[in-house]
Image: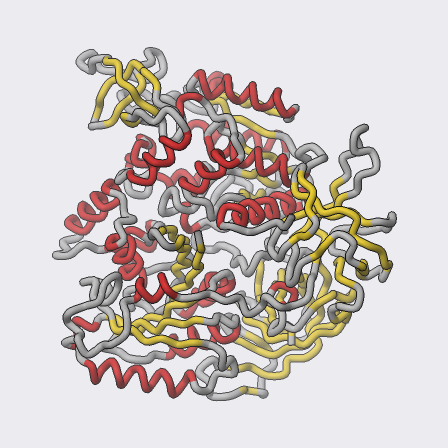
Amino acid sequence: MKKDLSHINSLENEAIFILREVAAQFDNPVLLFSGGKDSITLVRLAIKAFYPAKIPFPLMHIDTGHNFAETIEFRNHLSNKYGLKLIVKKVQDSIDEGKVVEEVGPYASRNMLQTVTLLDSINEYKFDACVGGARRDEEKSRAKERIFSVRDSFGQWDEKNQRPELFDMLNGKIKHGQNVRVFPISNWTELDVWSYIQKEKLDIPSIYYAHKRKVFYRDGMIWSAQDGIVYRNDDEEIIEEIVRFRTVGDMSCTAAVLSNASTISMVIDEIKTSTISERGARIDDKRSEAAMEKRKQQGYF
Amino acid sequence: MEVLKIATAGSVDDGKSTLIGRILFDTKSLTSDKLEAIKKTSKKKGYGYLDFSLATDGLVAEREQGITIDVAHIYFSTLKKSYIIADTPGHEEYTRNMVTGASTSQLSIILIDARKGIVSQTYRHFFINNLLRIKNVIVAINKMDLVDFSESVFNEIKSDFLRISNKRDFKEQKITFIPISALNGDNVVSKSDNMPWFDGCSLLNYLENVKEKDIFNKTNSRFPVQYVIRPRNQEFHDFRGYAGKVYGGNLSVGDDIVVLPSNKRTKIKGIYFFNEKYDTATRGSSVSITLNDQINVSRGDMIVKAGDLPRISNKINAVICWMDEKKLTIHSKYILQHGVNRVFGLVNEIYHKINPDYSGIDSNIISVEMNDIAKISFELNSPIFCDEFLNQRANGSFILIDELSNNTVGVGFIQ
């Protein structure tokens, strides 16, 4: 039998090449795991890249305290199933230590706050490479990312002065205190990720599929009704809808979409015909046209 | 589904980003929320049209200045193909990004403003396409609406272009001319009624039907070892897998191989991809292989078929494209990364600068400046196992890294 290289296979081979470069070029890498479909894909690729050895670096999850319960449950299930080393850092601890202040008001989320927890954790563990599941097709400032993207000791992205990346040669040389953000699935689209999940028969958190949920409407978006986490005005009425989540961030910054897609092939059909972009239901991106670029400059993924 | 990787190049204001935005719009790849955002911003800026460049210029500075600074990767698909476009900046100071974008592309689109005709950047773009051996080049003559869709303007630019392109040393390259208006969509996705004199097809139609044959297909097998997989557990106690990507031709179980630089000979015992075993690994696959004999192999070593050796040398001649503000000078030392292997390289000689406008060479130089293309020789502290770039892209190219800044400062093509 031959290893053939169809589109999805060539993306897989490219990502495995990048993950092996991470293990070879860095002393202390980490895989940033959010519990979303992209980082689940990354974990699968990392398992394949180093098989039959274990993934030679740990996973780290920045727990905002606003995660969906299903995501946390899934995270624990996955790390147990494959014996992965998992580090969990909590945004609540950064709040308790007085490093960040909780946002207030109807749009309060912990999306900006988690950058501080992330950067502190990178410093604490002295990680020199952080592997993430960001993709170029997600958002226009992410379209400008390199595969190996250097961050200074403040976690900042100097987007106007990026290293050229030629052919498949990756330059991970950095100075002490710097780190590199690595994006092995840069060239994957949303549909590629779903096709891969289908092909590899990967488990994903149940909230990606249609389910009944208590929600309320604001600004034309469907918010999860979760008192104590998601702010809700008294006049914002809770109703039940059949929904699913197309991207999984925090409850306070990810809106649901109406959907009956209860299987993976239904999800794929839905994405193929959708006229709304993947991050169209991300409340955190709607803050301004440059919301993502600004967060990235500060050290966000 | 087939994937086509495209690089776009043009000078400032030639309308590259507009063209890409137009393709996305006309192929219905722009989702309604993104379109809504473009409408809103176009209106805010007081434009009477939709500014599609807003879809691709992802950085604040780009939108403020109305220019593209950095390579953006854009993804879209039709029923026939998936496309990846590397939208590269046209400013001279961002030429390094143009080389970057072109290095991973199979086809290139050069844009020319019909009002301005060929400008100095056009030469440079075309030269880089030649240097990188891009097989298909589309010359899109844009803004035809502003020259009354004139056939004679198109023909004049075309013959000007052919005058340069006849000087290229890569004669296998195919050049196709298409008159377009990216702003209005003429000849972009469908054929325009405004230019009945044009007998070719629309840009997208060309892309859909172009057959991308890889001219580097028939070359030798090269397997640079990236990483050694040693599980050290009970089940795989003695497993030593050499992980890497296959370049050139295939590798098969039972092949007689040589490990460089040790020159030890053995056979391929197994080819693995995750938990599956294969008889053959094809070009581009990231596999791990085991060998019949216990040989010491580490990262940077290269496994090749016996009787099919690359050049093994600590002296190389190369054409380089310099990408750093700090000049390259004679006797300066750089880290030379060839694939996954790193050595030190000392600049032995600077032979000449090659003028990218095809006006010849300039031998009277003592340093190489940002955006210069020059022929150099290097002396290496240990030999590399390489091929000529013309025969094999992957094993014939390298990057140069500055030891102090750690930046990638140049790219080289081995001669």
The residue sitting at 69% across, 62% down in the picture is B221
Q: Is residue B64 visible?
A: no
Residue A184 in the image: x percent, y percent?
A: 54, 44
In the picture, which quadrant includes the C terminus of chain B? bottom right
Front-lying residue, A77 or B288:
B288
Quarter of the image for residue B204 reads bottom left
The residue sitting at 46% across, 21% down in the picture is A71
Q: Is residue B236 above or below residue B132?
A: above
The residue sitting at 58% across, 47% down in the picture is A13
Front-lying residue, A104 or B340:
B340
Q: Is residue B307 visible?
A: yes
Q: Is residue B350 above or below residue B248?
A: below
Say how many tags the image has: 0
Q: What colouring style does the render use?
A: secondary structure
Quarter of the image for residue B256 reads bottom right
Residue A196 in the image: x percent, y percent?
A: 49, 38
Residue B121 in the image: x percent, y percent?
A: 38, 75
Front-lying residue, A69 or B97:
A69
Q: Is residue B383 above or below residue B86?
A: below
Residue B377 in the image: x percent, y percent?
A: 68, 76
The residue sitting at 57% across, 34% down in the picture is A44
Left or right of residue B103: residue B53: left
